[in-house]
Amino acid sequence: MIETHQLLLFIAAGWLLNLTPGPDVLYIVTNALKSGVRAGFVAGFGITAGCFVHIVAAAVGVGALLAASAAAFTALKWVGAAYLLWMGVRMLWARAPAGAAGGADLAAARAAPSAPASLKKVFLGGFWTNVLNPKVAIFFLAFVPQFIAPGTENKAWAFVLLGVLFNINAIPVNAGWALAAAWMARRQGAIQRGMHWLDRVAGAMFIGFGIRLALSERPGA
């Protein structure tokens, strides 16, 4: 079993890592700014669901395969990079809604994403943004085992438990990003008036993340 001080260190490290800006944080903030705190929460839950896929995959050996096999890592890397680039291009070419500067139109636009289908798309977007990033699998494979005692009988089960704990601890951090972004959107008139430019900025950043992922090398290569 993991010792108490090691467990507290694991929790603290997880919070710090989740506070680091990246594609996941950008996705949460973008959706919260555009569509309100509910969309930000849903984006965070989608990312959390994606993390569970990586946790289970790493526990059964897929993460080890990605770490050991250049071909497997490269294949998933290009799929993930293509997805990020596709999202970025789509955001760059998104058309601003008519009358976006008007109060009634802005309120209607902010209410529209609350429809179940839109929230489903937000959730799935967060899910795939996370799942298609091989570096997340490598991260879990490199980070979690450091906190598993050498004498642990069932290391795979311990890995899953720590991974689940990491994911649960990430939920309040993701919610904090969503709340902060939604708070800014409600109180900053300039942000509301220029909301249609958010897609352009976020799109450019997603393209940057995609290019960086495409140019990255397998850890330990």
Image: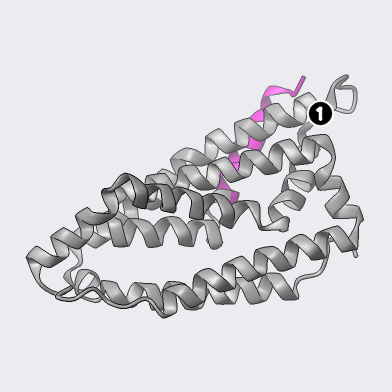
The question of residue 77 being in magenta is answered with no
Q: Which residue is mark 1?
A: 156
Q: Position of residue 22 (x, y in %)?
A: 56, 62
19 lies left or right of 61? left
What span is colored magenta in the figure? 1-17
72 lies left or right of 214? right
Residue situated in front as seen by the camera: 209 or 165 = 209
Report the magenta stretch's main SS.
helix
Residue situated in front as seen by the camera: 11 or 99 = 99
The question of residue 8 being in magenta is answered with yes
Q: Quadrant of residue 132?
A: bottom right
Q: Position of residue 92 (x, y in %)?
A: 43, 79
Q: Position of residue 159 (x, y in %)?
A: 76, 31
Residue occupying the point 60% across, 66% down? 83
Residue occupying the point 72% across, 36% down? 56
Q: Residue furthest front?
A: 117
Residue situated in front as seen by the camera: 85 or 25 = 85
